[in-house]
Structures are given as structure tokens and as C-alpha cells.
Image: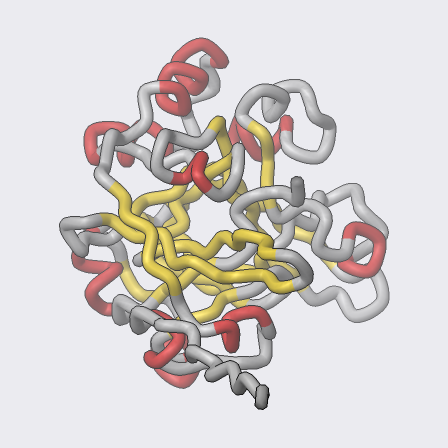
Amino acid sequence: MPLMCGRMTQQTSPSEIARIFDAELRDPDEQAALGPRFNVAPTQPVRVVVQRDDGRSVELHRWGLVPSWSKGPGQVGARLINARVETVSTNPSFRASLLGRRCIVPADGFYEWRREGRAREPFLIRPTDGQTLAFAGLWAPWRDPASGEWLLSASVVTTAADETVAQLHDRMPVILRPAAWLPWLDPQLRDGQALEHLLHEQSRRRLELVAVSPRVNSPHNEGPELVEPYQPPVHATLFGGG
């Protein structure tokens, strides 16, 4: 199976995300221009909550971690969109970020697919209470040696699927409990056991599966209609006879 999570929604406004996580909004004009997102895909901008020396902020990062030692986004492509909880502390691509550059990726839901023959049927996986989910994330800064410009990127930590998501996939994002938000964001927390506890004691939010339009299959499609329940059209069968 492909890695999870590979597509998500961020419909909640940046200002509301800032309120929920008690954070400041960085680059508000750029975030407002991006608008609500109903089909966030790898390599696209994704909103994250980061704790910095001057406070907590909501920022835009590239989805797909680009480690500081990497030759650049072209080297890793979209391969590092997820970090497996079982190996995040030992994987060279994620180890440094786990120890000092953790973030929260707020989401309203995420997508997974069920294969029926050649068709891929998309489902939106969302909380039944309608509240924002807090995915455990990692971030990294990468400096372009040619231009000197900085690229900020992020990855979502994944774990074994719960019984709802397991109907479609064996992996799902780690959903942090509200009590875990502060310690997870704290860059001074570098205790491996404590971090592992935060990742394994994830939220028990109730999730539901909603069949949605196959337009979700293309990352180029956007709009609120993508998260609406979808009923596949019934094709009439004509019988001839005599």
C-alpha cells in the first residue's frame, strides 16, 4: 500500500487555526490568498503550527520534508511526506526534526481510496464532531546554495490505522491529544521516551468515512464540492430481445 497520509483538507481559516492553537499568524496576506484547501497534495503549501523563540506561529510549509543536508526538493520529491512512528527516531531523514523541529499539522480531514477493479473510489475521513484534527508533524529548513533563499518543509507522522481507517488502509496520521500539543511543540523537549509516549498516546477521536467525488483523485481539483457526500451515478442497462 502507498504511504499515508497522502491528501488532506485544511478548510478552517488561518485565523481560526491561530485561535485554536493560541498562535500568531505569519504572512497573513499570503495565507489569506491561499484560501481554504479541500485537496492538499504533496509538494503543495500546507499550514503548520510551529513553536519558535519569539512564540507560536501558523506558517506555510512545503508538504514533503526537505532535510537540511539534502541537495534540495528535487532530490527527495514527494517521498518524505510521511514519517513512520516506528522508525522516526532512527531514520536519518527525520531524526533531527524529531528532536528539535516538531510541528502540528491542523486538518479537517484526510483522504484514502478503495480500489474497485480499475477504479479508485475516494473517501474523506473526518472527525464526527467536526472539530479540527492535530496531526503530529515534523519540519525542516533548507537553504538553497545558489539563491540563499530558505525553504520550510513539513512531514506528517503516521501510525497503524484504527478500526475505521483500517477498512481502507493500514496507516493513518498520528492525531495528538490536546494535552500533548504543548509538549510536542516544545523544541526544548528532547527526551526520546517522552516523545514516543506523546506519539503512542494519540487522541481517540471518532472518525467516519464519507464517499466523495472522484474529482479528488486529481490534485489539480479544488473546491468545497470535493468534501460533499457522493453517490456514484447509476448507469441504466438496456436489454434487447425478441
Decide if residue 38 is on the left or right side of residue 183. right
Position of 136 relative to 64 (above/below) = above
Q: Residue at x 62, y 42 (%)?
A: 3
Question: Quadrant of residue 202 in the image?
Answer: top left
Query: From the image, which quarter does the N terminus lie in?
Result: top right
Total label count?
A: 0
Residue 152 on image: x %, y %: 59, 57
Query: From the image, which quarter does the C terminus lie in?
Result: bottom right
Farthest left residue?
129
Q: Nearer the viewer, residue 113 or 239?
A: 239
Q: Residue at x 23, y 37 (%)?
A: 205
Decide if residue 198 is on the left or right side of residue 121. left
- Can the viewer see residue 30? no
Position of 24 relative to 56 (above/below) = below
Q: Nearer the viewer, residue 36 or 139?
A: 36
Position of 140 relative to 100 (above/below) = below
Q: Residue at x 44, y 39 (%)?
A: 167
Residue 93 on image: x %, y %: 71, 34
Residue 65 on image: x %, y %: 64, 48
Farthest top residue?
193
Question: Quadrant of residue 59 in the image?
Answer: bottom left
Colouring: secondary structure
- Can the viewer see residue 207? yes
Q: Nearer the viewer, residue 13 or 166?
A: 166
Residue 241 on image: x %, y %: 58, 87
Q: Residue at x 42, y 73 (%)?
A: 232
